Amino acid sequence: MAVRLTPKSSKDEISGIEPYDGKSVLKARVRAIPDKGQANAALVKLIAKWLGVPRSTVSLASGGKSRLKSIEVRGNADELINLLEESLAELDKK
């Protein structure tokens, strides 16, 4: 999944979806600074918690030094799609 990360934020959160460079991406903010992979690690942890999956199933696929990241979540595709849809629906309620 594509994620646009904002480090050095006031809180860790997934705040919705936004258009970015012609495609829709997940907006994420983390308190960690972008130094020595701290913000990337915080993002992976945040995504795992947000989806309710083990941290070990989530990894940074690309974009280590970019604001636009590609996150890989391993597992059953149908279950992951359902988790993503449920998590996005919860964002709409806020």
Image (cartoon, rainbow, N blue to C red):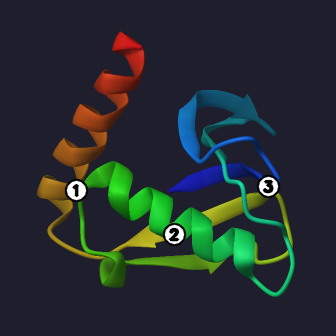
As drawn, is 30 to the left or to the right of 57?
right
As drawn, is 90 to the left or to the right of 14?
left
The spot of residue 36 in percent (x, y) is 82, 87
As drawn, 33 above or below 89: below
Q: Quadrant of residue 72?
A: bottom left
Q: Which residue is mark 1?
A: 80
The amino acid sitting under disc 2 is: Val
The spot of residue 71 in percent (x, y) is 53, 67
SS class of the residue under badge 3?
Answer: loop
Q: Which residue is mark 3?
A: 7
Q: Determine crowd level at label 1: few under 14, some 14-19, many 20+ residues with C-alpha closer than 10 A.
A: some
Circle nearer the N terminus (3, 2): 3
Outermost residue toward the front? 10
SS class of the residue under badge 1?
Answer: helix
Camera-nearest residue between 68 and 42: 42
Q: Determine crowd level at label 2: few under 14, some 14-19, many 20+ residues with C-alpha closer than 10 A.
A: many
- Kindly report which numbered mark, 3 or 1, lies closer to the viewer in this rendering: 3
Q: Gap between marks 3 and 2, in whole Å?
A: 13 Å
Q: Quadrant of residue 40?
A: bottom right
Camera-nearest residue between 92 and 25: 92
Q: Which residue is mark 2?
A: 44
